[in-house]
Image (spheres, rainbow, N blue to C red):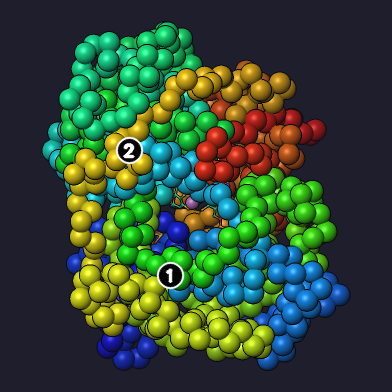
């Protein structure tokens, strides 16, 4: 019997530690690492599914080429020489900027950044910027604190009040739930603020059904109540914060009742919530759903300011935990991604189609897609497909024939996390990291991404790249040089161990912030527009939230849904009654971007005039991004999926 330690490579808050056992007759079993203080011996369904994905009959096991619309299997040698030839021709005829690399985070291993290192070695290729995921909040916390850091999960037990603001850990961050339950047993208040009465809300002691996009109004109302009641921490503010007097001056001009009306909550509820938050230390746990809006950055900044006026920063049991970028200081990203260009062309992810079809029409000649399924996951699917079809040469690297892979010209099959070593760190929540063990050799005829790019580099005679990036152990050792030299560990010494970073116990404990002034920076309210989203609705009177599915990591576990089955759209029963539609009916949802069919289901959990669909459904099932808009947030170039307005069309019987 042999035991291995690896980790979950999925783009999830938890980054679980996984124990794999291979018995003498080659039976493989996996379970969550019992010793790991966050995994606590438990993997979610998606984690357990790693074995099925590893052994799936649907895995691609040969390079594929599309010939006259049909896929044929080809050998690696043919794939490498034809792709290298195409890359060479494109660069020679149109320059490196006519190549585009679209990488996402479908696998969170550090080694997977070799795609960027390779492309950057070709010259000033086109790269994405902005985010589908967390961009507005990251930009907001950068303005306020200098960067986004989170309290360790265990520190929640020191909080008297925990406010879970727009995160749904029961679906997306399951290992946070035991910490919340333990805190609740200790007598802490557990508050959930969410337009949907989620499964997480049912764990809470207090739930507030806010209107979407109104978090900034709520934070301002709470700040007003706190300051008017003289509950603010004057010493903390005057010693460690910048911009307070202007913030306060503008705040006094705002009308409390008008702010509260926008939130959809009653005045009593807002006063109760403020009192709970003042029962400190209070921890705010932010999610990413509430920043996928045009005002996403501003709203996160206004929530941050609540923590500052109450002095809930740099103290145990406090903080505004949004993301955890602590690991970044230990990683040499410039080397890892081979960032060397000053004038590299970039496009904003959610504006992919405008870039391809308008801004640089006919200029992008080749595209590589790695670790992502943009055809489905980008907003505005109709336009994304049009833009995709406009690019003459496309290569996707994936384990499966996704919708994106199927729309490409070549597909190259890559290894699964169990088939290689990699360095994994969760930048989203906790600060544990892993150097995973290889459990099995790669499946026959499948290659690691590292090997794929090194081989392509050989075919293209990229000698400099091969000198600096040709060997995977050197790649990790160089990229992690500061981590290794500071801990005195070798890369091999990290393997199979359960380690977390020191120095991240209580973020900002020194009260020395990473902003230019070294102080917490209050948002300037001078130019803040407090307009109401309702004004933009016209005929499209329902706001559609598209949230992350519990049983799938985006599109990755939804491949087997049969063709012709439509996603369920959840709607408040009173709203359904008003529009004369019965639960179970198939309806058409229409937005300014497109239409999909959907099965409507009554749900008391959904606020009035709201619709909820889980994202990740494949093209054959009419995924929700056919409807979503392709704009960006105020800061951070974040996609604004939830700022989506629809009408419901009854279908003829
Ligand atoms: N099972 C599963 N787990 C996942 C993922 C997955 O696809 N499936 N994806 C992973 C990834 S990439 C990410 S980014 C994270 C995301 O993790 P979360 O942030 O937890 O997930 P979301 O579904 O984006 O949104 C969370 C909540 O925000 C609420 N929300 C939406 N709009 C508003 C608003 O205006 N105000 C307030 N207060 N709340 C609002 C939604 O109703 C929802 O309950 O999850 C990760 N974990
Ligand atoms: N409507 C709506 N849309 C959304 C969101 C939303 O809330 N609403 N959320 C957005 C968010 S937060 C995110 S993060 C994005 C996610 O967008 P994506 O990352 O594009 O989504 P996934 O479906 O997880 O696709 C990841 C792909 O990577 C592949 N993969 C796994 N391991 C490897 C590997 O080692 N190498 C390679 N080359 N491929 C691998 C998987 O098989 C899968 O096909 O979606 C966004 N889209
Ligand atoms: S998907 Fe998340 S919770 Fe599930 S096993 Fe992977 S890291 Fe853990
Ligand atoms: Mo994400």
Q: Residue at x 79, y 69 (%)?
A: 94
Residue 153 seen in the current view:
yes
Q: How many marks?
A: 2
Badge 1 element? helix
* Res 99 → quadrant: bottom right
Give the label on residue 110, or none: 1
Is 240 on the left or on the right of 9, as rendered? Answer: left
Instruction: Locate the C terminus by quadrant.
Output: top right
Using a 10 Å C-alpha cutoff, classify the residue at mark 2 as few (fewer than 14 neighbours), some (14 to 19) or many (20 or more). few
Where in the figure is residue 590, as x and y percent of width and height?
72, 34
User: Which residue is more in the foreground, 432 or 646?
Assistant: 432
Q: Residue at x 43, y 65 (%)?
A: 333
Q: Ligand 2 falls in which quarter?
A: bottom right
Is 595 on the left or on the right of 255, as rendered? Answer: right
Q: Residue at x 43, y 70 (%)?
A: 110
Q: Residue at x 20, y 56 (%)?
A: 503
CA–CA distance in space, label 2 to label 1: 32 Å
Is 340 on the left or on the right of 523, as rendered? Answer: right
User: Which residue is more in the foreground, 653 or 98?
Assistant: 98
Assess whether mark 1 and mark 2 are in contact (beta carbons under 8 angstroms).
Answer: no
Q: Relative to 81, does residue 610 appear above or below in the rendering?
A: above
Q: Relative to 402, does residue 182 appear above or below in the rendering?
A: above
* Res 28 → quadrant: bottom left
Give the label on residue 517, or none: 2
């Amino acid at each position: 019997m042999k035991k291995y330690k690896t980790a979950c490579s999925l783009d999830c808050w938890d980054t679980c530690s996984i124990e794999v056992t291979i018995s003498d007759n080659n039976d493989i079993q996996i379970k969550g690492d019992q010793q790991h203080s966050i995994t606590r011996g438990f993997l979610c369904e998606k984690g357990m599914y790693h074995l099925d994905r590893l052994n799936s009959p649907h895995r691609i096991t040969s390079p594929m080429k599309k010939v006259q619309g049909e896929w044929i299997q080809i050998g690696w040698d043919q794939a490498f020489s034809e792709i290298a030839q195409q890359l060479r021709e494109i660069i020679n005829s149109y320059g490196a900027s006519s190549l585009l690399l679209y990488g996402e985070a479908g696998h969170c291993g550090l080694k997977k950044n070799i795609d960027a290192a390779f492309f950057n070695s070709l010259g000033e290729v086109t790269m994405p910027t902005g985010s589908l995921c967390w961009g507005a909040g990251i930009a907001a916390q950068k303005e306020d604190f200098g960067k986004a850091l989170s309290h360790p999960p265990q520190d929640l037990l020191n909080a008297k009040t925990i406010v879970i603001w727009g995160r749904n850990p029961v679906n997306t961050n399951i290992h946070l739930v035991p910490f919340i339950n333990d805190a609740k047993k200790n007598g802490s208040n557990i508050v959930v603020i969410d337009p949907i009465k989620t499964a997480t809300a049912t764990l809470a002691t207090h739930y507030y059904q806010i209107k979407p996009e109104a978090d900034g109004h709520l934070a301002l109302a709470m700040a007003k109540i706190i300051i008017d009641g003289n509950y603010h921490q004057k010493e903390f503010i005057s010693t460690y914060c910048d911009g307070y007097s202007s913030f306060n001056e503008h705040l006094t001009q705002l009308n409390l009742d008008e702010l509260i009306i926008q939130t959809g909550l009653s005045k009593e509820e807002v006063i109760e919530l403020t009192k709970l938050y003042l029962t400190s230390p209070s921890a705010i746990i932010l999610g990413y759903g509430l920043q996928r809006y045009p005002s996403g950055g501003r709203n996160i900044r206004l929530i941050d300011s609540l923590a500052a006026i109450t002095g809930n920063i740099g103290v145990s049991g406090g903080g505004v935990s949004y993301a955890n970028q602590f690991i970044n200081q230990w990683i040499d990203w410039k080397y890892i991604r081979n960032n060397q260009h000053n004038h590299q062309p970039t496009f904003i992810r959610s504006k992919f189609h405008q870039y391809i079809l308008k801004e640089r029409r006919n200029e992008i000649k080749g595209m590589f897609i790695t670790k992502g399924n943009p055809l489905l996951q980008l907003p505005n699917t109709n336009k994304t497909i049009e833009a995709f079809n406009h690019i003459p040469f496309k290569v996707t690297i994936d384990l499966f024939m996704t919708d994106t892979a199927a729309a490409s010209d070549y597909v190259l099959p890559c290894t699964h996390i169990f088939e290689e070593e990699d360095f994994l760190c969760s930048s989203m929540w906790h600060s544990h990291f892993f150097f995973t063990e290889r459990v099995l050799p790669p499946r026959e005829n499948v290659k690691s991404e590292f090997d794929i790019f090194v081989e392509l580099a050989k075919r293209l005679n990229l000698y400099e790249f091969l000198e600096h990036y040709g060997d995977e152990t050197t790649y990790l050792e160089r990229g992690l040089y500061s981590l290794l030299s500071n801990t005195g560990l070798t890369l091999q010494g990290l393997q199979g161990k359960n380690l977390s970073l020191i120095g991240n116990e209580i973020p900002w404990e020194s009260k020395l912030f990473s902003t230019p002034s070294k102080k917490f920076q209050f948002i300037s309210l001078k130019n803040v527009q407090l307009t109401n989203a309702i004004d933009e609705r016209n005929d499209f009177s329902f706001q559609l939230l598209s949230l992350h599915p519990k049983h799938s990591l985006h599109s990755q576990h939804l491949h087997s849904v049969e063709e012709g089955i439509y996603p369920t759209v959840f709607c408040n029963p009173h709203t359904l009654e008003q529009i004369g539609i019965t639960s179970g009916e198939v309806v058409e949802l229409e937005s300014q971007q497109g239409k999909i069919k959907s099965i409507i289901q009554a749900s008391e959990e959904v606020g009035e005039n709201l619709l909820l669909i889980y994202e990740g459904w494949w093209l054959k099932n009419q995924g929700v991004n056919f409807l979503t808009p392709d704009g960006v947030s105020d800061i951070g170039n974040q996609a604004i999926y939830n700022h989506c307005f629809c009408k419901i069309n009854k279908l003829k019987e």
